[in-house]
Amino acid sequence: MGGQPALHTLQINLEAPQARLQRSLQRAIDLVAFGLTAGAAAPEGQVRMPGPAMQFATAQNYAMSFAQAKEEFELWVLQSGFRDAVEGMQDFLEEARVVCAALALGPQIKVLAGWTPPFTRESAEGQRFHWLGLEKKLAVLKDQYDVAPGPELRTAVEEINQARHCLVHRGGVVGEPDLNHPEGLRISWRRLEFIVQDAKTGAQRPLVLNQRIEAESILALRIGLSARLFGLGERLSVTQEEFIGVCFTLLSVGQDLSASVLQYAQRTGVPPASTSGTERKAEE
């Protein structure tokens, strides 16, 4: 057909990947919180299915006592939340790749009518990316689009992902494939901590509950870094505080990488007003 080519619009929502990550992390946090609260409130008694369901045992001699089940349940809930949180990061990286691939087209291109974007998650490119591990996903984003989190956060998320591999493939018992440090499996994460700063000297110290604070002191919040080492053959476990620290770290990775995607958008020439949509011309 003749005449001017029709004007088509391809929506690019730069905030969508981060929003998905936030929802995923919130779900993991809420389910862990509910599980720990329910477990703590469970009345002591025989371990059995609730309601009228038929009781079924596959190894009666190894059935847990109430005390054993309660202790194991807390560990299981935290490990499950840990795995789900890392899965949310994998989903975030896939969404970030789609956004970067769309931005790589530039602010305006001409395409044939009925054009199908070749970079969706369902496309061949998307499926290849899907089956990559987290480290390789990060490498693709860096190599193809120069999009990446900062070095400290990249190290932390790779260590957290290695712990997830340990939980999924070896039941949480550290094996040879999990070792990322001379002394075993290292996991690092960010933590938020309140500090007390002396108004005169500027000296800082951690806030301790029930400890007096001088009137001239300044109460502040800072981000610190924590780490744990698990030796070969040791069972991987996390506390509630460490689980929250891992979720905070994954959120920080998402924020850092999202800022990098925005910088990439600016380099491709997509105007700031097009962060929610960029125009494409389609030839009829």
Image (cartoon, rainbow, N blue to C red):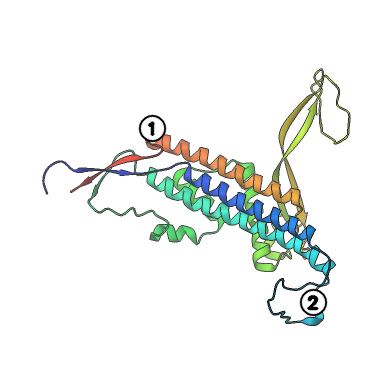
Q: Is residue 198 left or right of residue 124?
A: right
Say few, some or many: other residues with alpha carbon within 10 Å of mark 2 (under 14 / 14 to 19 / 20 or more).
few
Determine whether label 2 and label 1 are within 8 Å by CB: no
Q: Residue at x 77, y 27 (%)?
A: 219
| 167 shown above or below 96 | below
Q: Residue furthest front?
A: 52
Disc sitting over residue 63 in the figure: 2
Q: Where is residue 193? Give x, y as percent.
A: 75, 37
Q: Secondary structure at mark 2?
A: loop
- Find the distance from the CA under tag 2 to the CA under tag 1: 61 Å
Between residues 90 and 49, which one lies in front from this camera angle? 49
Q: Quadrant of residue 161?
A: bottom right
Q: Residue furthest left?
A: 2
Q: Where is residue 155? Give x, y as percent.
A: 64, 47
Q: Residue furthest top?
A: 200
Q: Earlier in the sequence, mark 2 or mark 1?
A: 2
Between residues 238 and 148, which one lies in front from this camera angle? 238
Disc sitting over residue 273 in the figure: 1
Q: Is residue 197 visible?
A: yes
| 124 shown above or below 282 | below
Q: Where is residue 52? Give x, y as percent.
A: 69, 76
